[in-house]
Image (spheres, rainbow, N blue to C red):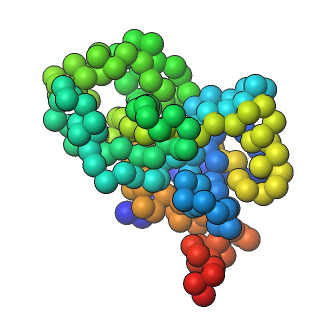
Amino acid sequence: MKLNTNIFKIETNHIPPKQGHVLIAEPFLSGSYFNRSIIILASYSENGAVGFILNKKVDYPVEDLFVDFPDFDSEIHIGGPVGTDSIYFIHTLGDVIPGSILIKENLYWGGDFDTLKMQIKLGLVHQNQIRFFLGYSGWDAGQLEEEINENSWLVADIPQADLMNIAEDVMWIESVRAMGGKYSMWENFPENPSLN
C-alpha cells in the first residue's frame, strides 16, 4: 500500500511533543519494542506521557483473548513494554463509547468495553475504526524530552485518517519517505547493522 504523502503532515523535532502527535523512531534505536516504531501519544503532560506503538502486530486476533468477545476481524498490536497483561484501544467512535478520552480530532482512547463489544456484535464497528494494543509505552516526567534531545525520536503530526488506515508493515518506511531530505537515507539502513 503506497501512502499518498501529499496529505502527510510531517515535521521533525521542530515541533514539540503533545497529545495526538506521533513519535517516529530513528533507525538506530535498539530494542524489539521500539525498533522502527511509530507511537501515537495518547496522553502528554509535564508529568509524563503514554503512547501506543501503531506498527507492531501480534499474531492472533483480539477475540482469542476474551471468551465472550464477538467475532471481529481485527488484530492486536504491541502497545509497549508496560502493562502487557492488559488490552487497550484507540478508536474513531467518539461518544458512541462512553468514557472515551479525546486524543485529537476524531481519535479517542478507551471507553466502556462492554459498549464496544455490543457495538461490534451489532456490526456497527469497522476494522479501520479501532486498534487494540497489548500493553503501552510510558515515560516519566522529562524522560521523553530527554530521549528526543538524544535524537531517539522525531516528533510528527500525522492526520488521523492515515494513522488508522495505513498498513502497519509500511507505516515507518512511508513516514521516513514523507519526511524526505536527510531522513531519506534511513529507509535503506539495515535493521540489524551487525549483520552487514
- Above or below, 33 against 85 in this view is below
120 and 138: which one is in front?
A: 138
Quadrant assignment for the N terminus: bottom left
- Above or below, 62 against 27 in this view is above
Q: Which residue lies furthest to the top in this view?
A: 98
- In the image, taking residue 150 as reference, residue 139 lies left or right, namely left
- Above or below, 150 against 186 in this view is above
Q: Residue furthest front?
A: 85
Quadrant assignment for the C terminus: bottom right
The residue located at (58%, 75%) in the rendering is 192
Image quadrant where residue 151 sits: bottom right
- Above or below, 191 against 17 in this view is below
The residue located at (61%, 44%) in the rendering is 22
Residue 121: x and y, percent?
A: 17, 25
- In the image, taking residue 16 as reference, residue 87 lies left or right, namely left
Q: Residue furthest bottom?
A: 196
- In the image, taking residue 165 as reference, residue 6 lies left or right, namely right
Residue 164: x and y, percent?
A: 42, 43
Q: Is residue 38 visible?
A: yes
Residue 165: x and y, percent?
A: 39, 47
Residue 52: x and y, percent?
A: 53, 40
The residue located at (63%, 81%) in the rendering is 194
Q: How many marks?
A: 0
Image quadrant where residue 88 sits: top left
The residue located at (56%, 38%) in the rendering is 82
Q: Can residue 180 be seen in this view?
A: no
